[in-house]
Image (spheres, grey):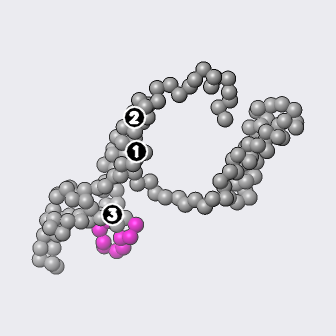
């Protein structure tokens, strides 16, 4: 975390403490507590990753429209005239005929967004399923004594 981010967290902590109220000493003490809490774990190294699954662990894997086999995803590595999607099944004949190789080729697509709608639909359906499971699992998370305490 760089100094700019730490400064922003410090400002957020002071604003939150001011909203809580109290004397100057109480506000500063609360701001320090909030800031320490926000900075917990900031020294840990984190890496960003591309989401590949729904919240419940289900992973979207596109399939060949011709033979229903899984396909290679070459969106990040394809160069030149290489297809960005290609059927993994060597026996697939759902593609076009190649004069160069004198045979029917496996299915391939050069459209990077070939499965975009299917992936969105898959993730939306699985997100609904995981949300429904969570709602059914926890009926009422609030207890009577929870109303007397701040939510942080």
Residue 44 on the magenta span: no
| Residue assigned mark 1 | 56
Residue 79 on the magenta span: yes
The kind of secondary structure element at disc 1 is loop
Q: Nearer the viewer, mark 3 or mark 2?
A: 2
Q: Are marks 3 and 2 in contact (CB under 8 Å)?
A: no
**On-image quarter of the C terminus:** top right
Magenta residues, start to end: 76-84
Q: Could you classify mark 1 by the number of other residues whose Cα lies within 10 Å: few (under 14), some (14-19), or many (20 or more)? A: some
In the rendered image, residue 107, in percent from the top left (x then y), is placed at 20, 64
Q: Is residue 95 above or below residue 9?
A: below
Q: Nearer the viewer, residue 137 or 70?
A: 137
Q: Is residue 6 visible?
A: yes
Residue 148 located left or right of residue 77: right
| Residue assigned mark 3 | 73
| Residue assigned mark 2 | 133
Mark nearer the N terminus (3 vs 1): 1
Q: Nearer the viewer, mark 3 or mark 1?
A: 1
Q: Main secondary structure of the magenta part?
A: loop
Q: Is residue 110 visible?
A: no
- Work out how far the residue at label 3 is from the one at label 2, CA to CA, in angstroms: 31 Å
Q: Could you classify mark 2 by the number of other residues whose Cα lies within 10 Å: few (under 14), some (14-19), or many (20 or more)? A: few
Q: Is residue 36 above or below residue 44?
A: above
x 16%, y 58%: residue: 67
């Amino acid at each position: 975390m760089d100094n700019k981010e730490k400064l922003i967290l410090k400002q957020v902590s002071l604003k939150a403490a001011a909203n809580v109220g109290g004397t100057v000493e109480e506000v500063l003490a609360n701001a320090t507590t909030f800031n320490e809490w926000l900075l917990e774990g900031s020294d840990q190294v984190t890496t960003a990753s591309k989401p590949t699954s729904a919240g419940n662990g289900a992973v979207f894997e596109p399939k060949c429209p011709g033979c229903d086999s899984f396909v290679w995803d070459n969106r990040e590595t394809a160069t030149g005239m290489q297809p960005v999607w290609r059927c993994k099944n060597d026996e697939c004949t759902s593609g076009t005929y190649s004069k160069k190789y004198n045979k029917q080729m496996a299915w391939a697509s050069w459209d990077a967004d070939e499965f975009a709608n299917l992936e969105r639909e898959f993730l939306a359906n699985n997100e609904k399923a995981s949300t429904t499971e969570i709602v059914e699992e926890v009926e009422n998370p609030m207890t009577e004594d929870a109303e007397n305490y701040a939510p942080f």
